[in-house]
Image (tube, helix red, strand yellow):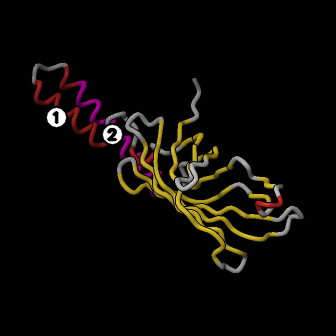
Amino acid sequence: MRTTRLLMRLVLAVAVLCAATIAVAASTTDATTAAAANAMVSAAVGNDATPQKEALVGSWLETVTFPESGRQLKSLVTFHDDGTVVTSDQGNVVTDPAQNPGVFSSGHGAWVNLEKRTFSYNLVELISDLSGNLVAYLKVRGKYTVSQSGNNYTGTSHYEITDTIGNLLDSGDVTNAGARIDVP
């Protein structure tokens, strides 16, 4: 983590240096120099002046869609700059006897930047019965791509529900669409 922060500081320092080069070049009549300096800044920090690997950091309101049934649920997701992720899903308490009553914890996990605006994550939720006994785990892994604006993402995820000794009880794939929660 310390190495990552040092690397980010180095990237930002290069960006500042490139911006200074643009300012100097812009004050001259050499359009070629100005264009080259501008290209260096874009390459160093991305078109929107935000480092690509930081594009996912923040809180999101996500729509999870189960393609086979068309059913949707909402999820709150926060990706932290230290590579951790925390989620909370709609319907975390199920009391209907026909649907295996239980309580899902919030999800906790990790994420990494794969390239540019594409990210991978893994997380785990605990599933307890209504008496509080641990009965299963929900494991989710997925891949998201953040839009160029940085305000939305789309992706797919695979989930598995296992009992406490690892036997697979259910699995499937979902699609995800997130919208950044921001200060207006």
Nearer to us in this view, 54 or 103: 103
Magenta span contains residue 9: yes
Q: Is residue 1 visible?
A: no
Q: Position of residue 141 (x, y in %)?
A: 53, 62
Q: Is residue 132 visible?
A: yes
Question: What amino acid type should be assigned to the residue bearing mark 1?
Answer: Ala
Tell me where the magenta segment starts and ends, as one range. 1-23
Residue for point 20% across, 34% down:
37
Whether residue 126 is situated above or below residue 176 in the rendered picture: below
Toward which corner of the image does residue 94 lie, by quadrant?
bottom right
Residue for point 57% across, 43% down:
62
Give the total number of marks visible in the rendering: 2
Question: What amino acid type should be assigned to the residue bearing mark 2?
Answer: Gly
Residue for point 56% across, 63% down:
172
Q: Which residue is mark 2?
A: 46
Q: Position of residue 158 (x, y in %)?
A: 53, 62
Dominant secondary structure of the residues highlighted in magenta in the image: helix
Can you tell which of label 1 and label 2 is closer to the viewer? 2
Nearer to us in this view, 177 or 105: 177
Whether residue 52 is situated above or below residue 84 in the rendered picture: above
Q: CA distance from mark 1 to mark 2?
A: 15 Å
Toward which corner of the image does residue 169 lie, by quadrant?
bottom right
Toward which corner of the image does residue 130 lie, by quadrant?
bottom right
Which labelled disc corresponds to residue 36?
1
